[in-house]
Image: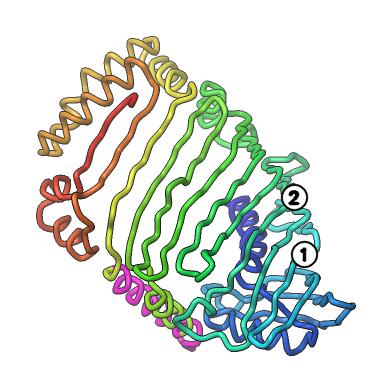
Amino acid sequence: MKLARSIGVVLASSTFLCFASSAFALDGNDVLAKINALYALQGGKVEAASATVEGTNVKLSGVSVSVAGADGKAFPIGDVMLENVEEDEDGYSIEKVAFADVNTTQDGVTIEAKDIAIGGVYIPNEPTPGTIDSMMLYENFTTGPITATAQGKQVFALDTIEANLNAAEDQSKFDFDATVSGMKIDLTTAPDPKAQEAIAALGLQQLNGEVTMKGAWTVADGKFDLTEYAFDFENVGRLDINVSLSGYTLEFIKSMQDAIKAAETNPDKAAGQQALGMSMMGLMQQLVYNGAKIRFDDAGITAKALDFAGKQQGVDGPQMATSLKAMMPMMLGAMNMPDLQKQIETAVNAYLDDPKSLTVSATPDQPLPAPQIMGAAMGDPANLVKTLNVKVTAND
């Protein structure tokens, strides 16, 4: 957990300026005022010890960022260089925002990150809530190597992060993609001996892989399609999540921004967070569900897991698979959903016989408003499964 928090702080800091650090024009103080006018819509604040102009560049020294939900705590970013800043009558464009390398230690974990940069950022003179101008746009975000070291041992590393945001000429649609490549995770430092036994049996001492993401957002109807969100690790497998929602409109975003600002400015932080939670629950009911799918493609982990589980029972992997297949009807009986139970049993049996892939999809015949789904879930879960058109398949 300490490692996750430490990495999260660094990535959150980088990501902040990926979305929020849109520009500080040739008048550094004016730029800072405008970035804050824009970032305030998200409930945050940017501060800098100084802002100096160097030709077409602007250097911000001693930058710190306050983000929504952090109780006003400021996170130090270091120096930020805005390269090739241009001003027009509507705002400022920046060719590149380059950040100082990160080297920080928290909770005994040292995080290092290099070559953090954002390309093609833009900040308007007058960001208007409920419009595209309020959304802090950029074209790309990249980093070099990022590492985490604990007790003198590197426990996490990645080679690069690259994210791209491509807008239609009329800004009616945005396509996005991101890749985290060269990920390396060392699990040999897990303190629990039983966990170490399982890690060794599954061959998970060193994990290598990447994370990829692709999707699109249409402004008019707020349709958000996450067409790929995949975690792919060598000798383990690939887990891919797809989701499609509508209703994520500019009006919806403005309502979220307003709710976040209200929570941040509430002197009673507990009451503010409670009110924010209630607001978010209400906003979620404005969304429309189009469909979702989760797919796992095996790369060897299933056979190892069966061998490990079987060893605990005094049997080998194939025998363990046979036992699981025999227990499946009893395990699924409590669901009281015969059609779905049959699908699951058939898919799991096929997968255990020949582990290739498992897929769970829920794609209704027509989009469903969130309140309708919530009502069906509380009233008759079996009917909800039919309404969502849930399918479970294997090796397809």
Q: By what rule are the colours in the image chosen?
A: rainbow
What residue range appears in magenta? Answer: 262-284
Q: Is residue 341 left or right of residue 28?
A: left
Q: Is residue 346 above or below residue 279?
A: above
Judged by its main secondary structure, the magenta piece is helix
Quadrant into which the C terminus falls:
top left
Q: CA distance from mark 1 to mark 2?
A: 11 Å
Q: Quadrant of residue 271?
A: bottom left
Q: Residue shown at 27%/30% (left/top)?
A: 393
Residue 56 position in % (x across, y down): 84, 76
Tell me the crowding category of disc 1: few under 14, some 14 to 19, or many 20 or more residues within 10 angstroms, Cα based: many
Q: Is residue 244 above or below residue 315?
A: below
Q: Is residue 329 left or right of residue 317?
A: left
**Residue at the front extreme?**
169
Q: Is residue 28 left or right of residue 5?
A: right
Q: Is residue 382 left or right of residue 25?
A: left
Amino acid on which the number 1 mark rests in the picture: Phe
Which one is nearer the viewer's eye here, 389 or 72?
389
Q: Residue shown at 46%/79% (left/top)?
A: 257
Q: Secondary structure at mark 1?
A: strand
Q: Secondary structure at mark 2?
A: loop
Q: Along the polypeptide, which appears first: circle 1 or circle 2? A: 1
Residue 84 position in % (x across, y down): 80, 72
Q: Which mark is residue 381?
A: none
Residue 149 position in % (x across, y down): 73, 45
Residues at circles 1 and 2 in contact by the CB criterion of under 8 Å = no
Tell me the residue that label 2 is attached to. Answer: 144
Tell me the residue that label 1 is attached to. Answer: 99
Decide whether residue 336 is among the magenta residues. Answer: no
Q: Residue shown at 15%/29% (left/top)?
A: 342
Residue 308 position in % (x across, y down): 44, 19
